Image (spheres, coloured by chain):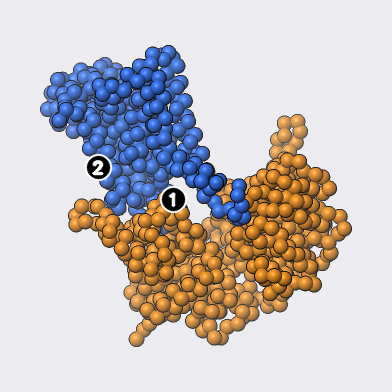
Chain colours: A blue, B orange
């Protein structure tokens, strides 16, 4: 009897993202069935794509038990550089966007270098690059907004086979990341490093390479996410990307990635986490919940996700511990 | 034909101003098992780490098959054909067995870095079969028992087809059957011409499995030779440098009349049932049982780490209504756990701070409870000297720089600072060499002579018979037998532990 109850709890804990998703889905479904129109869902998915892409990058970093607080700044910096190159220097759009993505890679490289070679904790490092990155961007743009041309905005609203381009980018990135994590040696080594970096070193894994790559991937994906977002808005504002790092982290954690490293998946995990957050935020607006209460509810849900992450590890170990006396508990 | 695979000459190594290896000469031969024995702190792990490429020697040379060998990292050692099976397992519990096996050399599809899943699954299955482990290669390591994990670790080492295999204390988590299987595997490897270095504290195993024995003491080779020339006594005296006539110090006191701890009818579903016993002041009471019999769990309940549903616990005559570590400490109970690294020590904090932890509240000054640092330091220093703790400056160095035996002394020292009247010790000499064991037993004796009550949990029956006044036997969460000193007998006690009748 008790064993069955334990098994149920373990399964629930291990599949937390899906359980959460279904629960919220049902709650909103009851409160307002019209929320689930195709148009609405598509809008949510399209606007969620940029956070999703950034969250995928964040997942890589979280898997190694690290963190990257600079993604919001990277989003802004990359978009700003691309925008300025187009607006002020008349660079061809594709080149400007490519350079924007490279900016993301450079941010990632700076993070890697400071974390790995200078041995400064990821939290402190990325906090600094966050401030520095945004500062550089504001300097470059003089805090002015940058208008983006039609050719860029096309990325935001174009469709392929009826599906909005942002969603397609998201899907491609999720697919590529999923394959990388589950089916390549690098991916397996990322999980190993996140579980126990000392054991990974002893096993002969090049932990420097692994850590450097995850931070660079995170930077690149943040840049892509930023560009896709501003493409939808048509403008790069000075406050763009602020606090996006928390959305990315929340999406990843709600999706089942553990901040302690070694546990998590891009699919279905981070995807569910992203959609969940967007759905909650959109849903609260749809239900006309008080504007000032909305952030608290979002924050509350994220708090619950982080809490469950902590509880999960303890619970699973405790419940899987063998009892000495096989009594009916 | 030279059958020497690895040769070390004049190896020196220093850490933190301390020389831990001095002029070590060492030869490993093909198809032979060489056992390396010595006290903890003698330098065995350091020597193996040098061979395994984890750090370089400060002086001296190494040659593999007559060619110079100076690895820059564990990767080099692996490529040279050395497989090192560490005492602390290096498996990743969040990955499958197959992933763990190939974590640094996955077979991939042509130029694309995609893992050939079917290939690693097949190869892993073969490897597991070769050591008769019947588990699916896709099983996550976190679902394996410690014994199974150790076998997987061995499998992993074998998968690289090494020339030399180093086993560092491989049998600590293995059952008897698993140990036998390990020895079969080692014999097979020997016949295949592989060279094996075997490190263990279990001298009987060493006598069983070795061809040659090398003894290290204080960083130097003090004795070596063919197994046939050795006896257990010779091994011990070479390790310790003096003739150990007794492994256990003389008991100099008898238990008193007054009771220190009374446990009545304590039960907790699934863990322990109806535990009744009394620990007298000045008594050393042993608790023996097979692995999984509930001894540590009982200790945790008494100390207040885990709850109990029924029963009563009385410490020094006071009935304890709500047990908790704080209550236990206030009532003079100390608990030296079996897992010193995770539960007994702050590995990265200084030795001094570690040892002052439990007693800190008694070294504070009213009204603001500021710490009396000097007094605390003097007390810690005194206890460290009494325990003959071997370390650098205790304010500067942390327990992670100490050997197992010295780490254990830090934990015991921490509790002695709290001046307990009852000491619960769980596997007090696990992973400790012969010399340090003697010192731990002496400390226990002295505490008993001072009138403290000692509850000693151990899976080494010999050790309990050598130090205790009485032994309780536990099995499946119950107390199934009690033996007084006069009744101490290997066979009888074991039979009761196995529930085979008295």
Which residue is pictured at 40% across the width and 38% down the height?
Answer: A256
**Quarter of the image where one finds residue A178:** top left
Q: Earlier in the sequence, mark 2 or mark 1?
A: 2
Name the residue nearer the viewer: B300 or B474. Answer: B474
Task: Tell me, yes or no, whether dots 2 and 1 are on the same chain.
Answer: yes
Q: Which residue is mark 2?
A: A176
Name the residue nearer the viewer: A55 or B62. Answer: A55
Q: Nearer the viewer, mark 2 or mark 1?
A: 2
Asked which secondary structure carries label 1, the reply is loop
Judged from this view, the residue extending furthest toward the right is B257
Residue B298 locus on image (x, y percent): 68, 53
Query: Mark 2, residues whose alpha carbon is within 10 Å: few (<14), some, or many (≥20)?
Result: few
| Mark 1 chain | A
Which residue is pictured at 47% across the width and 69% down the height?
Answer: B167
Marks 2 and 1, how far apart in space? Answer: 25 Å
Asked which secondary structure carries label 2, the reply is helix
Q: Which residue is mark 1?
A: A196
Residue A200 locus on image (x, y percent): 40, 54
Q: Cβ–Cβ below 8 Å for labels 2 and 1?
A: no
Name the residue nearer the viewer: B481 or A267. Answer: B481
Residue B99 locus on image (x, y percent): 35, 56
Q: Is residue A302 above or below residue B190?
A: above
Residue B106 locus on image (x, y percent): 29, 58
Which residue is pictured at 80% across the width and 44% down the height?
Answer: B319
Q: Is residue B243 above or below residue A195?
A: below
B36 sits left or right of A44 in the view: right
| Mark 2 chain | A
Using the rendered image of the protein, determine whether residue A190 is visible from the camera's viewpoint. yes
């Amino acid at each position: 009897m008790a064993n069955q109850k334990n098994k149920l709890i373990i399964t629930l804990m291990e599949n937390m993202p899906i359980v959460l998703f279904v629960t919220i889905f049902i709650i909103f479904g009851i409160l307002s069935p019209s929320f689930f129109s195709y148009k609405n869902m598509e809008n949510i998915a399209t606007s969620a794509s940029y956070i999703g892409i950034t969250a995928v990058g964040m997942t890589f970093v979280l898997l190694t038990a690290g963190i990257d607080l600079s993604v919001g700044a990277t989003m802004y910096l990359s978009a700003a550089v691309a925008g300025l190159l187009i607006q002020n220097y008349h660079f061809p759009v594709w080149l400007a966007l490519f350079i924007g993505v490279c900016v993301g890679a450079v941010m990632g490289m700076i993070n890697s270098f400071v974390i790995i070679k200078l041995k400064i904790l990821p939290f402190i490092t990325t906090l600094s690059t966050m401030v520095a990155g945004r500062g550089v961007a504001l300097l470059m743009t003089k805090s002015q907004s940058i208008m983006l041309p039609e050719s860029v905005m096309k990325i935001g609203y174009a469709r392929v086979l009826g599906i909005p381009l942002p969603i397609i980018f998201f899907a491609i990135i999720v697919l590529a990341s999923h394959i990388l994590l589950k089916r390549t040696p690098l991916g397996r080594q990322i999980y190993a490093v996140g579980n126990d970096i000392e054991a990974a070193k002893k096993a002969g894994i090049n932990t420097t390479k692994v850590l450097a790559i995850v931070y660079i991937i995170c930077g690149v994906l943040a840049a892509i996410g930023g560009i896709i977002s501003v493409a939808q808005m048509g403008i790069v504002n000075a406050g763009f990307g602020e606090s996006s790092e928390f959305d990315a982290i929340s999406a990843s954690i709600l999706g089942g990635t553990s901040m302690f490293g070694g546990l998590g998946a891009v699919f279905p995990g981070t995807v569910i986490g992203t959609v969940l957050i967007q759905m909650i935020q959109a849903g609260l607006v749809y239900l006309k919940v008080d504007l000032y209460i909305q952030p608290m509810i979002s924050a509350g849900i994220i708090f619950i996700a982080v809490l469950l992450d902590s509880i999960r590890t303890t619970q699973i170990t405790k419940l899987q511990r063998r009892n000495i006396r096989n009594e009916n508990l | 034909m030279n059958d020497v695979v690895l040769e070390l000459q004049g190896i020196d190594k220093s850490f933190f101003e301390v020389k831990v290896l001095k002029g070590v000469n060492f030869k490993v031969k093909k198809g032979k098992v060489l056992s390396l024995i010595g006290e903890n702190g003698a330098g065995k792990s350091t020597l193996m780490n040098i061979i395994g490429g984890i750090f370089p020697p400060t002086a001296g040379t190494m040659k593999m098959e007559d060619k110079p060998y100076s690895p820059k990292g564990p990767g080099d050692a692996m490529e040279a054909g050395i497989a090192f099976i560490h005492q602390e397992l290096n498996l990743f519990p969040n990955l499958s067995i197959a992933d763990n096996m190939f974590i640094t050399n996955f077979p991939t599809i042509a130029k694309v870095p995609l893992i050939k899943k079917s290939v690693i699954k097949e190869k892993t299955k073969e490897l597991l079969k070769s050591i008769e482990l019947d588990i699916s290669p896709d099983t996550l390591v976190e679902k394996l028992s410690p014994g199974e994990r150790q076998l997987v670790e061995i499998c992993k080492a074998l998968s690289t087809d090494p020339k030399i295999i180093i086993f560092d204390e491989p049998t600590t988590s293995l059952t008897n059957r698993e140990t036998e299987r390990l020895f079969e595997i080692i014999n097979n490897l020997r016949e295949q011409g592989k060279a094996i270095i075997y490190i263990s504290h279990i001298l009987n195993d060493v006598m069983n499995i070795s061809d040659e024995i090398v003894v290290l003491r204080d960083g130097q080779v003090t004795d070596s030779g063919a197994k046939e020339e050795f006896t257990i006594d010779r091994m011990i005296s070479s390790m310790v440098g003096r003739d150990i006539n007794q492994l256990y110090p003389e008991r100099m006191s008898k238990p008193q009349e007054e009771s220190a701890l009374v446990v009545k009818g304590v039960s907790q579903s699934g863990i322990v049932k109806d535990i009744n016993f009394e620990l007298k002041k000045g008594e050393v009471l042993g608790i023996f049982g097979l692995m999984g019999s509930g001894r540590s769990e009982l200790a945790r309940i008494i100390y207040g780490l885990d709850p109990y549903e029924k029963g009563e616990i009385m410490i020094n005559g006071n009935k304890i209504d709500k047990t908790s570590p704080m209550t236990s400490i206030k009532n003079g109970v100390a608990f030296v756990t079996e897992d010193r690294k995770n539960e007994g020590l702050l590995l990265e904090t200084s030795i001094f701070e570690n040892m002052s932890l439990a007693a800190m509240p008694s070294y504070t000054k009213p009204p603001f409870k500021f710490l009396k640092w000097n007094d605390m330091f003097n007390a810690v220093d005194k206890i460290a000297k009494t325990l003959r703790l071997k370390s650098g400056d205790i304010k500067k160095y942390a327990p992670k720089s100490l050997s197992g035996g010295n780490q254990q002394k830090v934990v015991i020292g921490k509790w002695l600072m709290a001046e307990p009247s009852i000491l619960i010790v769980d596997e007090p000499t696990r992973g400790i060499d012969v010399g340090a064991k003697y010192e731990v037993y002496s400390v226990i004796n002295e505490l008993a002579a001072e009138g403290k009550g000692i509850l000693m949990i151990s899976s080494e029956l010999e050790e309990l018979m050598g130090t205790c006044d009485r032994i309780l036997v536990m099995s499946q969460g119950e107390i199934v037998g009690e033996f007084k000193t006069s009744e101490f007998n290997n066979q009888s006690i074991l039979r009761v532990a196995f529930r085979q009748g008295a």
